[in-house]
Image (cartoon, coloured by chain):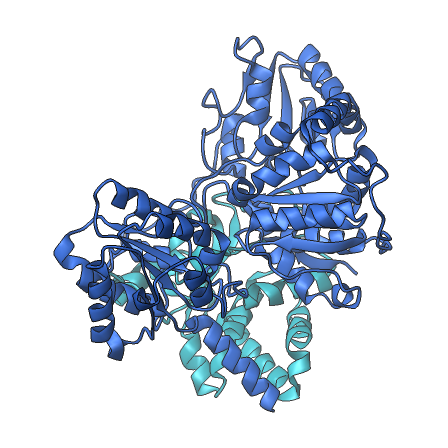
């Protein structure tokens, strides 16, 4: 019987069945469910497959590369912006190559359902000159990770699996394949393969360049790339990844008059593309994310008749859907009923009883006399403090940016400046910025709003639990300017008083309001009650 | 989402293809969340339902039922719980929401929370909703019952019976009130 799985879970199951020995990841929508699934899998537990969360995406990528070095199959999973954090290791991992197969799963979020941008990870794979597998269905999510390790080992490079929100968070039935054995531990045959001294790196880079044609050939022969003949040569279609589904929704195979290429493995299958270009008048490119393929085919001189997101055939931004693709072919799109005017928005909000609320309520009072515009926040549930009624924060850019942006603003005279950062974000990327702030004696107040959890993504364990005070003291925060508070309504006055005092201090202060995430507390109490029974 | 899981189990039992696109992440902090569910005896392409293509909007909250009307097909049914969830200050007046709902050609409005409380099964309001949806889905009632047994089986017979009763109550309500 088929197994009903989210795309993200199908990726995880494929990796388990494909002989993976460890997944390394930091939570981030829409990638989180991959690692959670492995953490909950009995067979993964039995095999002792590593699945503990990493402190951030860079440490995850590095650990995955280390496991590959030792000959085993590894996977690093992250959301698209996590690729930015991991990029240093990622770019160099294509130069070192792999020993055991290594997959990098990048989960993109076109339309920014739960993200600050909609960058397309296929760019990274092209940058690193490695193959990309882009599933169009949950079954392909499974098949691609299952077989992706072989591809990685065959060409000695990491392989990217690129998924998007819509496939990661959509369920379908999956057929499983026979479970493979894990690799035995083994050292790389060439002991200097992973030593990127310039002389060695130059040699490795030439190897990477030399296999590029092989990778194109692999795409041309890939079972996931397909050329469908069509009698009507007025148009040809290139449909990538999940966009292929939206295309087929409008043109089922039996009714489609045009030649079509389904692209699910990159680099692009050149022979198929050349064949299509030679036989059709114009090419329509359907891809979810940035117009990467379209730009590549169109070129700067725009010689080819290529249509897509760049010429307005499809919108330049946002995720695709069946209606947008229908409109691109001139089909009438059913509009459905209008939304009645009385329907108001229901934006996300911090939960009733959330500790962040008590923090913002106190901060807003303490900071009032200095005026607005000086609170630099970070990424987590507390980013919702930007919305009414709090209107408490002025920035949310990237993981850890609160502390360093506050420092930069203070350096330019915005004193006091405040950073608000969560516990998990602090150990992800905030603590290095804290060193800058301490060394520079920056007049900033850092509030580490500690709910002992990575909550926005569903309450995963935070690397920071039990460590924050020691980290702060170790990097040189003065003990008299380090405070731990209990954020509750009844402690409001005390919180205002301590925050006020530290705002007035001409140096680095760290305030740690600490109370367990309310959602996590409820779940914990339920589990405890169950255990008692 | 538990409704979607029960529907999914029922569909797989009938050897049908399903795709079910959910909302995870930031919106789960009290924002609006929606699942697109497609069930077919043929392969399903798109994970998303095209606008004007949904056979049913099944909503556990009346304002949310209206939010997704652009997806409803002209022949489609709205089946909604009438108990509002007010986590926003500017929540519209309840009667005006009901007026909008009652204007629709095919609608079932059901106070599932009250019905569940009356049955002494407060946590089963979503299963009442599933039962209310069942007459409009092209699957046997039996397969819904089996879906319930699948999902609640390990919680014991009492829980199963309670949810089967809830399913039946929702089903009967719709059979009586459908136009």
* Along the viewing direction, whichever of B135 and B30 lies nearer the viewer: B30
* Along the viewing direction, whichever of B155 and B176 lies nearer the viewer: B155
Determine whether, in the image, residue A470 is placed left or right of residue B131.
Answer: left
Q: Colour of chain A?
A: blue
Determine whether, in the image, residue A156 is placed left or right of residue A250.
Answer: right
What letter labels the chain drawn in cyan?
Answer: B
Determine whether, in the image, residue A509 is placed left or right of residue A154.
Answer: left
Q: Residue A11: x and y, percent?
A: 69, 51
Instruction: State whether residue B122 is above or below residue A289.
Output: below
Q: Residue A326: x and y, percent?
A: 53, 32
Residue that appears at 47% across and 82% down = B122
Instruction: State whether residue A361 is above or below residue B170.
Output: above
Residue that appears at 20% across and 64% down = A500
- Quadrant where the C terminus of chain A is found in the figure: bottom right
Visible residue check, residue A312: yes
Q: Residue A261: x and y, percent?
A: 69, 26
Visible residue check, residue B37: no
Rendering quarter of residue A514:
bottom left
Q: Residue A320: x and y, percent?
A: 52, 37
Residue that appears at 64% across and 30% down = A128
Q: How many marks?
A: 0
């Amino acid at each position: 019987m088929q197994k009903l799985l989210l795309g993200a879970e199908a990726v995880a199951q494929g990796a388990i069945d494909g002989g993976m020995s460890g997944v390394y990841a930091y939570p981030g929508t829409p990638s989180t469910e991959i690692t959670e699934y492995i953490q909950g899998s009995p067979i993964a537990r039995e095999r002792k497959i590593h699945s503990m969360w990493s402190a951030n995406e860079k440490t995850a990528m590095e650990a995955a590369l280390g496991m590959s070095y030792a000959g085993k199959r590894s996977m690093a999973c992250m959301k698209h912006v996590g690729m930015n954090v991991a990029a240093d290791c990622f770019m160099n991992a294509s130069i070192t190559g792999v020993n055991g197969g290594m997959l990098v799963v990048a989960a993109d979020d076109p339309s920014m359902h739960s993200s600050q941008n909609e960058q397309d990870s296929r760019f990274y794979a092209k940058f690193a000159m490695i193959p990309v597998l882009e599933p169009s269905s949950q079954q392909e999510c499974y098949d691609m990770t299952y077989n992706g390790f072989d591809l990685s080992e065959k060409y000695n490079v990491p392989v990217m699996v690129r998924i998007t929100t819509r496939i990661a968070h959509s369920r379908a039935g999956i057929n499983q394949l026979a479970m493979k054995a894990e690799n035995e531990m083994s050292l790389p045959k060439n002991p200097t393969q992973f030593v990127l001294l310039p002389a060695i790196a130059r040699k490795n880079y030439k190897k990477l360049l030399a296999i590029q044609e092989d990778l194109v050939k692999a795409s041309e022969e890939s079972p996931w790339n397909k050329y469908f003949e069509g009698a009507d040569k007025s148009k040809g279609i290139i449909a990538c990844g999940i966009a292929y589904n939206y295309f087929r929704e409008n043109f089922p195979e039996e009714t489609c008059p045009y030649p079509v290429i389904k692209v699910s493995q990159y680099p692009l299958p050149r022979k198929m593309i050349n064949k299509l270009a030679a036989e059709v008048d114009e090419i329509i490119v359907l891809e979810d994310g940035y117009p990467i393929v379209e730009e590549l085919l169109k070129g700067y001189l725009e010689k080819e008749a290529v249509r897509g997101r760049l010429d307005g055939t499809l919108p330049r931004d946002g995720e695709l859907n069946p209606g947008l693709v229908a409109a691109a072919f001139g089909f009438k799109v059913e509009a459905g009923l209008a939304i009645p005017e009385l329907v108001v928005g229901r934006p996300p909000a911090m939960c009733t009883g959330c500790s962040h609320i008590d923090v913002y309520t106190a901060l807003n009072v303490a900071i009032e006399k200095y005026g607005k515009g000086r609170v630099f926040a970070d990424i987590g549930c507390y980013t919702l403090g930007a919305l009414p009624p709090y209107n408490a924060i002025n920035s949310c850019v990237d993981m850890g940016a609160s502390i360093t942006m506050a420092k930069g603003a203070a350096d330019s005279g915005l004193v006091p400046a405040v950073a608000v950062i969560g516990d998990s974000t602090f150990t992800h990327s905030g603590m290095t910025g804290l060193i800058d702030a301490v060394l520079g004696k920056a007049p900033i107040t850092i509030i580490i709003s500690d709910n002992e959890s990575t909550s926005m993504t569903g309450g995963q364990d935070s690397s920071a639990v039990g460590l924050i005070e020691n980290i702060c003291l170790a990097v040189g925060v003065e003990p008299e300017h380090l405070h731990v508070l209990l954020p509750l309504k009844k402690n409001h006055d005390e919180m205002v008083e301590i925050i006020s005092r530290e705002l007035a201090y001409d140096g680095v202060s760290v305030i740690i309001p600490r109370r367990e995430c309310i959602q996590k507390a409820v779940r914990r109490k339920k589990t405890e009650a169950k255990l008692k029974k | 989402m538990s409704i979607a899981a029960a529907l999914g189990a029922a569909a797989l039992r009938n050897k049908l293809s399903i795709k079910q696109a959910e909302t995870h992440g930031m919106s789960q902090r009290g924002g609006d969340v929606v699942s697109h569910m497609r069930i077919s005896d043929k392969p399903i392409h798109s994970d998303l339902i095209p606008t004007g293509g949904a056979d049913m909007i099944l909503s556990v909250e009346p304002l949310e039922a209206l939010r997704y009307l652009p997806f409803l097909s002209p022949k489609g049914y709205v089946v909604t719980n009438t108990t509002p969830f007010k986590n926003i200050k500017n929540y519209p007046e309840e009667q005006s929401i009901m007026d909008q709902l009652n204007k629709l050609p095919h609608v079932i409005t059901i106070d599932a929370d009250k019905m569940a409380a009356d049955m002494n099964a407060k946590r089963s309001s979503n299963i009442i909703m599933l039962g209310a949806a069942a007459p409009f889905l092209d699957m046997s009632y039996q397969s819904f019952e089996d879906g319930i047994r699948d999902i609640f089986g390990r919680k014991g017979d009492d829980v199963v019976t309670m949810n089967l009763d809830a399913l039946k109550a929702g089903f009967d309500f719709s059979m009586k009130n459908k136009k």
